[in-house]
Image (cartoon, grey):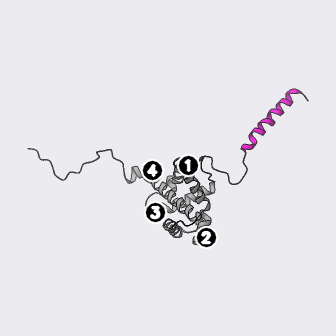
């Protein structure tokens, strides 16, 4: 064996060994866009379903059309402290099991009216256990950030309630008469 061939094979082997830990072949990988949150793609889809229940898009655009799930995750990642982030993630991870225990169905299997009733009841309940506290905090945080994102979206600010600079228009009640 000559030295050039050995060096070439060694370089290929070293490059492969360096890249191997980066290859993740698991089915559920964590989304890398949110450094502080450990969110998987299926959990993001569940969050999208919850936001679609809050903003269904019957008259106005729906929440998923405005990408509110991304806004909620970015706000949770950037603006909440570590304890609030852990509570949010725990509530998201336990949401399917919680809705199944409390309401007899998984949230992803509910129709629109059952999902609305589930969210209303969860927001109204008192948190008496860790599971209920996490679920209530998760839903209230999701609702708060989704509403903030909706009201600050380009769609809302241009088509629903157009922004006008101060002092905007003046609608006086008297006409000015010339002398």
Give the spatial CA distance, label 3 vs label 2.
30 Å
- Which marked residue is nearer to the observer: mark 1 or mark 3? 1
- Of 134 and 71, which appears nearest the observer? 134
Which residue bears the numbered disc 2?
Answer: 101
Which residue bears the numbered disc 3?
Answer: 58
Q: Residue at x 49, y 57 (%)?
A: 63
- Of 31 and 92, which appears nearest the observer? 92
Q: Which mark is residue 153?
A: 4
- Which marked residue is nearer to the observer: mark 4 or mark 2? 2
Q: Earlier in the sequence, mark 3 or mark 4?
A: 3
Give the spatial CA distance, label 3 vs label 4.
18 Å
Q: Are marks 3 and 4 in contact (CB under 8 Å)?
A: no
Give the spatial CA distance, label 1 vs label 3.
30 Å
Give the spatial CA distance, label 4 vs label 2.
35 Å
Query: Residue 148, relative to residue 9: is it above or below?
Result: below
Magenta stretch: residue 12 in it? yes
Give the spatial CA distance, label 2 vs label 1.
28 Å
Q: Secondary structure at mark 2?
A: helix
Q: Earlier in the sequence, mark 1 or mark 3?
A: 3
């Amino acid at each position: 064996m000559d030295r050039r061939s050995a060096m070439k094979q060694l370089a290929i082997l070293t490059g492969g060994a360096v890249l191997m830990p980066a290859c993740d072949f698991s089915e559920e990988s964590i989304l890398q866009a949110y450094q502080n949150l450990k969110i998987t793609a299926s959990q993001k889809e569940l969050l999208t379903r919850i936001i679609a229940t809050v903003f269904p898009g019957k008259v106005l655009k729906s929440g998923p059309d405005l990408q509110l799930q991304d806004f909620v995750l970015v706000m949770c990642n950037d603006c909440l402290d570590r304890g609030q982030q852990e509570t949010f993630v725990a509530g998201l991870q336990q949401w399917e099991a919680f809705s199944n225990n409390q309401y007899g169905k998984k949230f992803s299997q509910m129709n629109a009216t059952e999902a609305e009733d589930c969210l209303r009841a969860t927001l109204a309940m008192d948190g008496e256990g860790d599971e209920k506290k996490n679920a209530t905090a998760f839903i209230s945080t999701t609702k708060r950030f989704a509403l903030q994102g909706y009201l600050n979206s380009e769609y809302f600010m241009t088509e629903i309630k157009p922004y006008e600079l101060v002092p905007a228009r003046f609608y006086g009640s008297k006409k000015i008469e010339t002398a």
